[in-house]
Amino acid sequence: MDEPLISAPLVFRDDGTPYSPRHDDIYHSAAGALAQARHVFLNGNGLPERWRSRTRFTVLETGFGMGVNFLATWAAWRDDAHRARTLEFVSIEKHPFSAQDLRTAHAAILDDDAIVPLADALASAWPPLEPGMHRLAFDAGALTLTLVLGDATDRLSHLAEEGIAADAIYLDGFAPARNPDMWTPGIFASLARIARDDATFATYTSAGNVKRALRESGFEYRKVRGFGGKRAMLIGKRHDCKR
């Protein structure tokens, strides 16, 4: 039986940045949530270019948090005249926010008027905080968000059985030193099983243990310029042949 979920408390630092007391870490850079999402995860995965002219494109994220990466991806997909016909966004979260806290957080951190109606639609569709998979449909079903609520180690192992095959991976758990359970070799092995042969990934961290786990799981990586004062982040792709 699944353990009951423990929701995340909504806490802000003095500079207005959302903060997790559980992990003693921030949810996004003080330089801006949407700017970080676009620099690290969209640009890092070559989006929107990589989904163009595709019938279907799937993004897998580790750590939904406040949904900023999802909202930035949704907006970019909407604005792209050559977008994939359907976009599937799959994200895992062990400690989700309540719908009201999500609204409060979005009101505080989102600085793009085009994102506001998307954030409202997300909060309005927010599921009950119960373990398992919750599928939400937007834009007449052309975009689906599959929220996987629960422990990533357990949930990732089931996603391949659900037919999930990731084209792009957003590695966005809290920092490896703060939340090591999200960066284990087992997590990366599961991601490798879900990733398509040509899947890409991006993450804000360049920690040594993350690089080792990526390499051992069949991912190639390289360092590029980070965001918000970070010297480096990692981007890369799955090897052509799965092990």
Image (cartoon, rainbow, N blue to C red):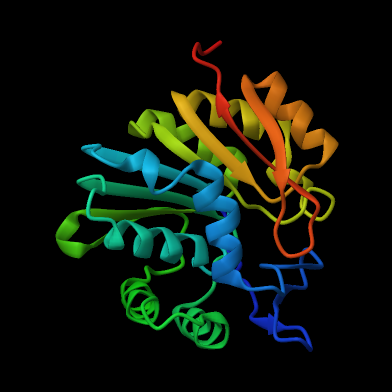
Q: Nearer the viewer, residue 204 or 242?
A: 204
Asked if residue 138 is positioned above or below residue 52 in the image, the reply reads below
Q: Nearer the viewer, residue 224 or 115?
A: 224
Is any atom of residue 19 visible in this view? yes
Asked if residue 152 is positioned above or below residue 228 in the image, the reply reads above
Q: How many marks?
A: 0
Quadrant housing the C terminus = top right
Q: Quadrant of residue 3?
A: bottom right
The answer to whether 74 appears left or right of 130 in the picture is: left
The answer to whether 80 appears left or right of 72 in the picture is: left
Residue 163 screen position, x and y as percent:
33, 31
Q: What residue do we see at 32% from left, 56% from top? A: 77
Q: What residue do we see at 71% from left, 19% from top? A: 216
Is any atom of residue 7 visible in this view? no
Q: Nearer the viewer, residue 191 or 33?
A: 33
The answer to whether 151 appears left or right of 208 in the picture is: left
Residue 32 screen position, x and y as percent:
63, 73
The answer to whether 40 appears left or right of 100 in the picture is: right
Q: Nearer the viewer, residue 118 or 112?
A: 112
Asked if residue 26 is positioned above or below residue 153 in the image, the reply reads below
Residue 79 screen position, x and y as percent:
29, 62
Which residue appears farthest toward the left when viewing the image?
140
Residue 148 screen position, x and y as percent:
45, 51
Q: What residue do we see at 47% from left, 30% from top? A: 199
